[in-house]
Image: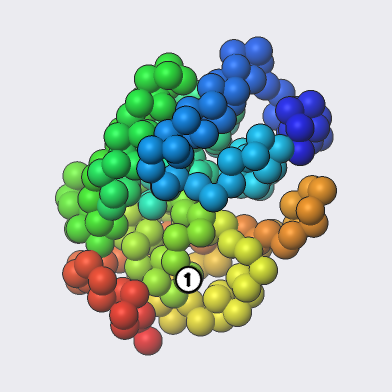
Amino acid sequence: MNKDQFLVALQEHGIELSEKQQRQFDIYFNQLVEWNEKMNLTAITDEPDVYLKHFYDSISAAFYIDFDKKTTLCDVGAGAGFPSIPIKICYPELELTIVDSLNKRIGFLEHLAKELELENVNFVHSRAEDFGQNKQYREKFDIVTARAVARLSVLSELCVPLVKKGGQFIAMKGAAAKDELIDAEKPLAVLGAKIKEKHSFLLPIEESERNIFVFTKVKNTPGKYPRKPGIPNKAPIQ
């Protein structure tokens, strides 16, 4: 997907990028490639692939969710900033918090935010399990996102505790998503979340399957969740 195709594809979903926003994506791509030579941020560095598999894929959440207001968004395990930084570029009013367990990645994101001149961004170096027990962040966000972090039965324990009651958890998944959703039914119910919407589509050009699940937080999460670091992955809620 070249830049022109990227712009047209977003326009088809009602997202018009200004010249400033287009420059921000250029800067993002260049910084990603430059920093990737020093540290492992992504295996995808070819420009058309970055625009398709990182930028467009990240923004696809906005085809189904309304980010067009002053919303608090938390991105768990964002790595090189996906999906939240591309969404933030498109919707500058968002108040964004990113949590990641690797301090080097946080360093990249802090540098990137300065280069992109982003405002209302907060980067936190923490394990998601510890972050979810921090009263400063627990059940404080309108929307919590995660993309390619862990299977849904595990991911729900890392993300749902951060969502305020009435807020939304958005899980961005690939082809195995429907099986993951079945396995995650019990954990989601225990954590206080309920499926609201399921969206399936094919990524343009390469036509690989994508699934976006939107969950609503219907009740507060029991205080013992998330459990200590590593436990959700070793022993998902049964």
Looking at the image, which is closer to me, 22 or 195?
Answer: 22
Residue at the limit of the structure toward the bottom, as seen here:
238
Q: Residue at x 32, y 46 (%)?
A: 99
Tell me where residue 189 appears, x and y as whole percent. Answer: 42, 75
- Could you tell whether 216 is left or right of 110 in the image? right
- Could you tell whether 66 is left or right of 76 in the image? right
On-image quarter of the C terminus: bottom left
Q: Is residue 128 above or below residue 36?
A: below
Q: Is residue 190 visible?
A: no
Q: Residue at x 73, y 28 (%)?
A: 3
Residue beneath label 1, please? Answer: 151
Q: Is residue 139 above or below residue 177?
A: above
Tell me where residue 111 appears, x and y as whole percent. Answer: 35, 26
Q: Is residue 80 above or below residue 237?
A: above
Looking at the image, which is closer to me, 65 or 179?
Answer: 179
Please name the amino acid that badge 1 sits on.
Answer: Arg
Disc 1 crowd rating (10 Å Cα; few below 14, some 14-19, many 20+) is some
On-image quarter of the N terminus: top right
Q: Is residue 86 above or below residue 22?
A: below
The quarter of the displayed image where residue 210 is located: bottom right
Q: Secondary structure at mark 1?
A: loop
Tell me where residue 56 appears, x and y as whole percent. Answer: 66, 40
